[in-house]
Image (tube, grey):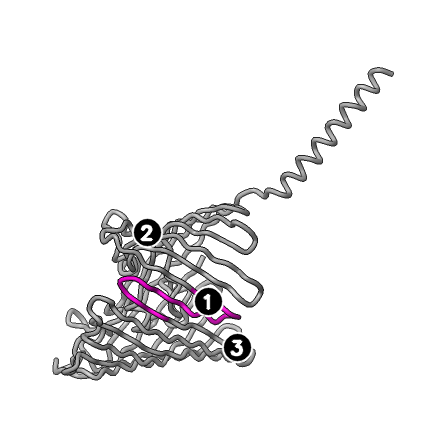
Amino acid sequence: MKNLLTLAMLFSVFITYAQDTISTEEQTPKKKFSLSGSVDGYFRQNIGGPNGEEAIAPNTSFANGNGFSLGMANVILAYEGKKVGAVADLVYGPRGEEAVFGSTPSNNIVNQLYVYWNVSDKVTLTFGNFNTFLGYEVISPTGNFNYSTSYMFSYGPFSHTGLKMDWAVNDDWSLMAAIMNDNDLTDFNPTNNYTLGAQVGFKGTYLNFLYGPQFQVDLTTGFDITDSFYLGLNSTYYVDNDTDASFYGVAIYPQLKTSDSFVLGFRAEYFGEGDGGVGAIGGYDDNGDANAFEFTLTGNYAIGDLMIIPEFRVDTTSEDTFVDNDFEPTGSLTSFLIAAVYKF
């Protein structure tokens, strides 16, 4: 009888311990490791402009090579828990090198490197190097519809290093506040200047601010007009507080889904520079002003995780930024590319 009582007591203790263990495991899920990324390349040719060693390209970021060209390999390592986690986003190749131009040579494969803490269901703190929250476009080609990038994206910041707080106020509204190094100074702070960042979001529309050595205000939004037609919009204004050099612009991004595997899209952008600008156009009038119109027609054809992206682009500038086939100065350039982007 004593033995039975002893066994019953031990069994009771075991059940209680098991229930407590299961409850603890349910409340504290195991951390998850994930691996993702992409690989891309492209073929590009000018139409009405020189190719080969003397090839020219629009003064925007990425996709500026001639002939068959490399994009980048991107590997994102993430170790994520319910409360805390870390992300290492590594890039290699020409597109990656252009994306991390503010890094020292020893760190020129680091696109993002940060840790985060979910303080609550609504508030997250992020510390480290993270891609910018401004603009419609991003560094990775998997996050953009167009393969080439806009003037506004190319001359805004790519990345920041600092501390930011994201607050999901409710299902519609969100807020973000940050303190960071100067734009694209991602490894450390050689200037000892700091930039404040802020974002107000409402139902997919975001108003972004930077204030420091440079000031920038940026609006990004998009709407599903119908089940098959989407319209995006980006507008920005930037000024260097030391030199008064500035740029500003607006772009629309209509996209039409014609089938489950193909979407046709268009980017129409106006971009202007003032007081000497930021070097985007390469020439200025007597007042230090210049402007550009850029029109890009892009198709996205999906084959599983592989995206084939043909693109036709026309750049027209107020100054003679380009040269024609006779190497005479001209204010326009037409180009064509086809890119392949694989996402894993």
Q: Specify whether 64 is left or right of 328.
A: right
**Of tags 2 and 1, which is closer to the observer?**
1
Point out the stretch of residues depicted in magenta: 199-217
The kind of secondary structure element at disc 2 is strand
Disc 3 crowd rating (10 Å Cα; few below 14, some 14-19, many 20+) is: few
Q: Nearer the viewer, residue 76 or 224?
A: 224
Identify the mark nearer the N-term, 2 or 1. 2
Q: CA distance from mark 2 to mark 1?
A: 28 Å
Q: CA distance from mark 2 to mark 3?
A: 34 Å
The answer to if 216 sits in the magenta stretch is yes
Q: Is residue 33 above or below residue 295?
A: above
Kindly identify the residue that appears in the image at 29 percent across and 60 percent down.
Answer: 183
Q: Position of residue 39 (x, y in %)?
A: 37, 59
Viewer can see residue 309? yes
In the rendered structure, which amino acid carries the disc numbered 1? Val
Disc 1 crowd rating (10 Å Cα; few below 14, some 14-19, many 20+) is: some
**Disc 1: which residue:** 200
Identify the mark nearer the N-term, 3 or 1. 1
Extreme right residue here?
1
Quadrant containing the N terminus is: top right
